[in-house]
Amino acid sequence: MTKRCQKYLGSQCFPFFVMARGKLYPSHVTNLVQDSLTPYSFISHTSASNLESISSSISSGKTTDKEFLDLTNFFCKREIRFFNEGEQSSFDPSVLRVYVYEMPAKFTYDLLWLFRNTYRETVNLTSNGSPVHRLIEQHSIDYWLWADLIAPESERILKNVIRVNRQEDADLFYIPFFTTISYFLLEKQQCKVLYREALKWVTDQPAWKRSEGRDHILPVHHPWSFKSVRRFMKKAIWLLPDMDSTGNWYKPGEVWLEKDLILPYVSNVEVCDANCLSESESRRDTLLFFRGRLKRNAGGKIRSKLVTELHGSEGVVIEEGTSGEAGKEAAKNGMRRSIFCLNPAGDTPSSARLFDAIVSGCIPVIVSDELELPFEGMLDYRKIALFVSSSDAVQPGQLLTFLKSISPEKIKKMRANLAKYTRHFLYSSPAQPLGPEDLAWRMIAGKLANIKLHIRRSQRVVKESRRLCTCECKRANITSLP
């Protein structure tokens, strides 16, 4: 990416942003949504600046057997140097080294350009009435990780992960394909063709062939994105919104916690900062709030049951969600006036609503039995959320009785924890320490030894060897009320 920027821009090697007051901002803000200029806004970062000039393809993606063997030999030599006592001091195992593929522009810059050019014009809604671009934004984790990786090291804050320019120096390989944008903004057949081309480009790379993709990171944060071909890349590390075990979104053997990573949605509402939290303290007179689609499929059928159970109850506000800015404003105001925010399962076990509640200072009440949470190896969600099983939540009077039994002291402590935890769910550029990008890399670093184990094992095991089960056998994620 650095050579590519130099080719078009000379010494300016970060084409989308300019520095201002210590933060990265778009260079052509007049062409963008004017009220989105915050370090957490995906829209404000997709500037038109230089997108057109760098949208040509730069790589065929073809590889040869010699390249494959050369790369394998490079990795072997690096491992030998690592175990040479005289050279260990120059190796820092705490730093993750990531190689970012320079994919043809149709997989990266052209898709960003498409998003930027259609943002204001888009009036199309999804089947459930949600604005298309709002969904792109809440699943835009592929953009935030990539934007941080390609920034010059002098402008990056995170130092536990660095981008390397040689594949033989890499621990991991990042695939910068904007799967969510392509899914929403391209015609169905056009999208499938692009997916097949991306699959071929990536799997033709010598690094992929060496590891069968085990050390490659594939962002597929929307559950339908890349769906037609992702079974061919199931050994890669997938970046996911959840890990639905019903089979509706992911096929058996495609996803499991040891391999993949759950990342938080980008929140849809503005962050309630310290002043906001202080001012809203006395105005939180609603016990339980929910705003969203009341009828969903799959595991989301619990919503209609909860509506029936809670309808007309004192201190409870349940509203059918509406799309657009008015609906977003209503959700924000409702969460800031409420003590607890209901977070039931939807079509998938998770939704952006959970993270909207967190950044609004509203204690989440999670009713989603199959939900997996981001960074749970580092964060204890019991400090900021309540978990209720679906069977308990629909019992007459049980959920409200439970919520009313929570002491004011515990509520105050949980809300204070929400204020501390908010930073872990705010994507930004530059990425911040203990932000979601930072925690993502820390979680992935923890998988590295196991990834190397499976790569080496696959290289020496003969084809006739017995197969080991790669699926995760686990009991249902069920929580009962005390």
Image: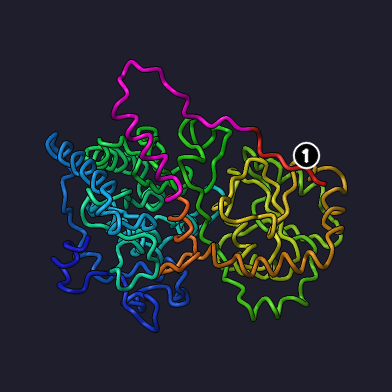
**Image coordinates for residue 204, horizontal then vertical, percent:** 22, 38
**Image coordinates for residue 14, horizontal then vertical, percent:** 26, 69
Specify the color scheme.
rainbow
**Image coordinates for residue 280, horizontal then vertical, percent:** 71, 76
Q: Tell me where residue 473 sits by quadrant.
A: top right
Which residue is located at x 36 percent, y 64 percent? 148
Q: Residues within 10 Å of mark 1 (few under 14, many from 20)?
A: some
Q: Residue furthest front?
A: 85
**Image coordinates for residue 118, horizontal then vertical, percent:** 37, 62
Instruction: Please state the extent of the stretch shown in magenta in the rendering.
Output: 445-474
Which residue is located at x 78 percent, y 45 percent? 393
- In the rendered image, residue 46 lying in the magenta stretch gets the answer no
Left or right of 158, for residue 399: right
Instruction: For mark 1, give the secondary structure.
Output: helix
Q: Nearer the viewer, residue 414 or 327?
A: 414
Q: Nearer the viewer, residue 87 or 413?
A: 87
Q: Nearer the viewer, residue 97 or 227?
A: 97
The residue that disc 1 covers is 391
Residue flagged by tag 1: what amino acid is it? Answer: Ser
